[in-house]
C-alpha cells in the first residue's frame, strides 16, 4: 500500500483509526482544511502514536454529531447582536442618534 492510497480502502478489516487523508475523505474535507481545523483547536480529537497523528472513527462521528444542526434551528436563528463599532461615528449614525434624542 503506497503512501497516497491509505485511508478507508480496506473493506475486509475493521478500521479503528484513520490518518489525515482517510479522515479528510470521511468528512468530505480537503486534507489542508482538516489540518487547519485541528491546528486551530476546532477539529476532531486527534490520537498521536509516536510522531504520527490519527483520528479514531468514533471521534470523527462525535465531531459530526457535535456540528449537526436540526432543520428547525436553521430556520429560527437568533438575530446577531450588533456591537458598537470602534472609531468615530458616521454621519448617518450621528443623524440617527440626534433624531432619537429629539423624540
Image: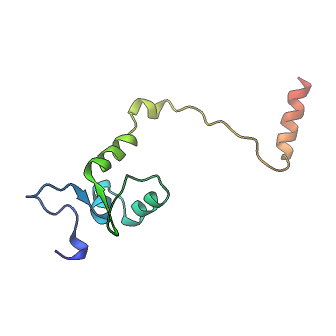
Q: Count every numbered label the image shows and give the total.
A: 0
Residue 45: percent from the left, percent from the top? 37, 52
Q: Quadrant of residue 21?
A: bottom left
Report whether 101 appears left or right of 69. right
Question: What colouring does the structure picture have?
Answer: rainbow
Instruction: Give the position of the N terminus as an image quadrant.
Output: bottom left
Residue 92, placed above or below residue 35 = above
Q: Residue at x 16, y 63 (%)?
A: 9
Q: Nearer the viewer, residue 76 or 49?
A: 49
Instruction: Give the position of the C terminus as an image quadrant.
Output: top right
Q: Residue at x 87, y 40 (%)?
A: 94
Q: Quadrant of residue 34?
A: bottom left
Q: Quadrant of residue 73?
A: top left
Residue 41: percent from the left, percent from the top? 47, 54
Report whether 4 appears left or right of 66. left
Q: Nearer the viewer, residue 1 or 91?
A: 1
Q: Residue at x 39, y 41 (%)?
A: 66
Report whether 9 appears left or right of 88. left
In the picture as drawn, the residue positioned furthest to the bottom comes out as 2
Q: Residue at x 40, y 37 (%)?
A: 69
Amino acid at each position: 500500500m503506497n503512501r497516497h492510497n491509505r485511508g478507508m480502502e480496506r473493506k475486509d478489516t475493521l478500521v479503528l483509526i484513520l490518518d489525515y487523508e482517510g479522515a479528510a475523505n470521511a468528512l468530505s474535507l480537503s486534507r489542508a482544511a482538516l489540518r487547519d481545523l485541528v491546528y486551530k483547536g476546532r477539529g476532531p480529537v486527534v490520537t498521536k502514536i509516536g510522531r504520527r497523528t490519527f483520528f479514531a472513527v468514533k471521534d470523527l462521528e462525535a465531531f459530526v454529531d457535535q456540528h449537526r444542526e436540526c432543520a428547525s434551528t436553521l430556520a429560527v436563528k437568533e438575530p446577531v447582536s450588533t456591537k458598537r463599532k470602534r472609531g468615530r461615528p458616521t454621519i448617518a449614525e450621528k443623524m440617527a442618534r440626534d433624531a432619537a434624542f429629539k423624540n
